[in-house]
Image (tube, rainbow, N blue to C red):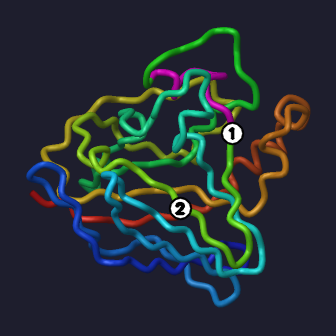
Amino acid sequence: MSNKIGVIILLIAFSIYLSSQKVEQNWIINTDLSKDETLILNVSNDTDGNVVFDFINQSNDSLYLFDSYLDGTYSIINEDLYGSKYLHRYDMKLKECKLSFLPILPFLSVNYTDVVVAGENKLIRKGQILYHFKPIPPQSCIQIAVPRKVFYSKEYVKEITLKDYSKFDSTIKFKDVIPKRCQRIKVEFAIYKDVSLLTSYDAFYFDELNFNKQALSYEVFSVSMDLLD
């Protein structure tokens, strides 16, 4: 599909030890290959206790990684959001654990509210987290580091289809769920080709239909890894 971001995902073999636990990459799913637009993902581990994702843009156009949940800078209180159960979701049908950094549209904004919410609940409160994107220029690479311990969270909510929700929805009802055991985890990122409206105050409030359309235009870029004892 010519309008979609073509994705080739390459995994560099790595082992991650967390206490007595080890993480290894396993296989890839949800890839959409294209000769014209290519985004490569390399996965490795560093000496600081992180899993490192290298996003390599081999195309001639800029791409944009949605990173509002990847850095506490984009919330009112500078707190890491990685461990929030709202990012850890469990697909009951597929028996699949996820760490999802896809945008939760009903709660994202372009400006803060007067009410400050601390802790993971700011993920599901309006005006606490702003839209933010990390550009991936043509023929360039960016890195994202995620703490290893995050992959072993025991707090999950039931999986939902995020593209079923828009900026016009007032809330989302999340349901807590306890997986029997996560033997593998799927990590999801949102990649955009155009974000021209998504940091605009005027577009957010006065061009809502087009803003919402662009906010939902991301492609899901995902990788699955085994979690081993």
Query: Which element type, helix, strand or loop, lies under badge 2?
Result: strand
Task: Give the residues in magenta.
Answer: 121-130
Relative to 133, residue 81 above or below: above
**As shown in the figure, which amino acid type bears the numbered disc 1?**
Tyr
**As shown in the figure, which amino acid type bears the numbered disc 2?**
Gln
Which of 197 and 119 lies nearest the eye of the viewer?
A: 119
Which of 121 and 217 lies nearest the eye of the viewer?
A: 121
**Residue under pointer 1:** 131
x, y (%) of residue 21?
13, 54
Marks 2/1: CA–CA distance: 19 Å
Residue appearing at x 36%, y 36% in the figure: 83
Residue appearing at x 36%, y 43% in the figure: 89
Left or right: 169 as drawn, with respect to 224: right
Crowding at label 1, few (<14), some or many (≥20) Cα neighbours within 10 Å? many
x, y (%) of residue 152?
23, 46
**Residue under pointer 2:** 143
Residue appearing at x 54%, y 40% in the figure: 71
x, y (%) of residue 127?
66, 22
